[in-house]
Image: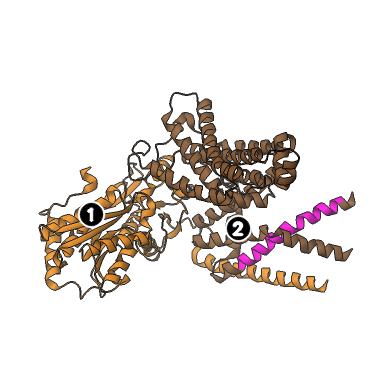
Chain colours: A orange, B brown
Amino acid sequence: MSRSRVVVAVLVAVLGTAAFGGCQKGEREGRAAGDGPDPSRIRVGLVLSVGGLGDKSFNDSAYEGLKRAEKELGIEGVYGQPEQMAEDEKYLRQYAVQGMDLVIAVGFLMKDALGQVSAEFPDSRFAIIDAVVDQPNVASLVFSEHEGSFLVGAIAGLKTKTGIIGFIGGMDIPLIHKFEVGYTEGAEYVRPGIEVLSAYAGSGPEAFHDPVKGKSLALSQFNRGADIIFQAAGSTGNGVIDAAVEKGLYAIGVDANQNYMAPGHVLTSMVKRVDVAVFEIIREVAGDRFSGGVHVYGLEVDGVGYSLDEHNEGLLPEDVIARVESIKRDIIAGKIKVTDYTAAR
Amino acid sequence: MKANVRTSLTDLVPPLVALVLAGVVSSVIVLLTGESPLRIAHVMLSGSVGGAGSIAGTLEEATPLIFTGLCVAIAMRAGLFNIGGEGQLVVGAFVAAWIGYRVGGLDPALHVALCIALAGAAGALWALIPGLLKARFGAHEVINTIMLNYIAFILTNYLIGLPYFRKPGQIPQTEDVLASALLPRMTFLYKYTRLNLGFVLAVVCALLVFILLRKTGLGFEIRSVGYNPLASRAAGISVVRSTLMAMAIGGFLAGMAGSERVLGVHRHFISPFPFGYGFAGIAVALLGRNRPLGVVVAALFFGALANGGAQVDIATTVPRELVTVIQAIVIIFVACEYPIRHLVLRRRGAET
């Protein structure tokens, strides 16, 4: 009997502490953010793509954009990570139902889902990254990946000793071929006749998170004589970087600046500023000048580019950088035309 | 009479204790991560049962689990462990999508019925493979159903890559099914819901399985074989027949779950198809004590957890992983109801 009383007492104590702690936390938040939605603040819902936070690439970059907007623009941001691709639609719709001022779909896999939801909520505002949804209330944020890839292709062409370089893509789709084609053209531009090996990890979305496959594809290309591999493959690319370290050769990062992941072995990264795109579209909403339609982030606004930092400064000599910078100016000026694989089709 | 009331009240104690304990443990973990347990509990509750939209969402999540729970339960009653609900569901979903967009010009009721029937048949055939191997050669159904799950996922992933099935574009999926093949959504409950007639179908199936097990000769045979196959055989009951029937009926139900997802929720087949319903069905069946009506209750509970959990992820900055941990803790404690019941009964025994 007395033992059961002790048990009850402990239960009450723990529950009480939990509830108290909860209240305290709630109050703290209450002072900082207002209880429940504050009508004067812009609210933004971000739906992340498969892979989710921690991919050190695409999703993390989008999340950074949201965080920056919270800090600099004082908006209130929430984000969701659907466990499965088929749940994207539910998340998008739920944010629209909650009356978010802007709902952002991170990734082309949500194209159909967003098309559906944006038609259901014509008065809500949406944005999607890497895809074009033809609705007046949707801002389609796309990047000139072919131009950025051209630059890192030129870097690879200038740096290779064997005259063979590699490309490893994630899912075998037009968007990733856009990287490959730009990269190949850039390499051929600085070194005609260069050999470019190419491989894709698969035909389904899982091809974007299979580092083991990425590593074995990379090792095979290195064994065939390549000394630099550009990967556009989500976390599959982490395996490519791994292989470069193992072989003492080079990889080129993608989307986020991945130079830090293996200093000395990541030649540079083809950065795609998803964070900038997310931040800019939130700023448009905050400034009440949101516009639907296609927004292109290219070289001229630094939407894409190559990364230089303390982790790769020893790898790129002055003359390489000077050459790439002049190519960049020529592309912006229209003197060099880079094939856009997705537009060509 | 008085004793009866008291017994049924005591029956309610163990599940409640289980929920409270789950709440305590979850709260501690949530506190450790610096979030507010009360806030999460509030969002989970209001997100699962607060308001028409939330309830509809819960019922929508519960629908496939009723089917897969029944699939596992009926096999269990026959003494079989069917872990293949996952694969049976996927082949059913694929067939439903295929018939749904390829076969045109049918009356809506007929088209939907055709899709569901063929999806069920596909699931049943998929389940009959391990069923036959078990009945004919004694090959263990656990291994074979698990392996067939992989085969189902890989096979449909391969098929969806063929131009005949694949919708042009970057996403591996079929065209949306025709309007005549759609299961009507219950929009009268909530405008944006994906809850559809499949839920009613699931409950009807639970009733049918209940009648089958309780009132028919086949049901008696299945239960009898489940209790004691040797004695059943000695009594002239065909173990082979009851094994095959239990697997086939279960596979049919799992295939129906796949058709409900395609015709009522997603409207197309997509690869990888949402996974987890088949495995969750095992937990649903166990929690429901392998009884059809128990399965319905357990599925509603799992549906509420899934939907409430998704709302936490959607509406707060709590990480998705923490939500999954909370869901798992609740399930563990509820599944541990038996030891708790044991403790409660012992205490009651000590008192009297």
The subunit carrying tag 2 is: B
Q: How many marks?
A: 2
Q: Report helix, strand or loop for mark 1.
A: helix
Q: Name the one closer to the observer, A32 or A93.
A: A93
- Which label belongs to residue B33? none
The residue that label 2 is drawn on is B42
Q: Residue at label 1?
A: A180
Left or right: B212 in relation to A226: right
Q: For residue A235, what is the image quadrant?
A: bottom left
Query: How far across and down, in percent of the image, does residue A171 sit?
Result: 33, 52
Residue at 42% across, 36% down:
B176
Q: Look at label 2 and name its amino acid.
A: His
- Pointer 1 and pointer 2: residues touching (CB < 8 Å)? no
Question: Where A132 falls versus A106 (above or below)?
Answer: above
What chain does mark 1 sit on? A
Q: Which residues are magenta?
A: B4-27
Task: Inspect the image, locate mark 1, and give the three-letter code of the amino acid beneath it.
Answer: Glu
Residue B23 lies in the magenta stretch: yes
Kindly state the secondary structure of the residue where label 2 is placed.
Answer: helix
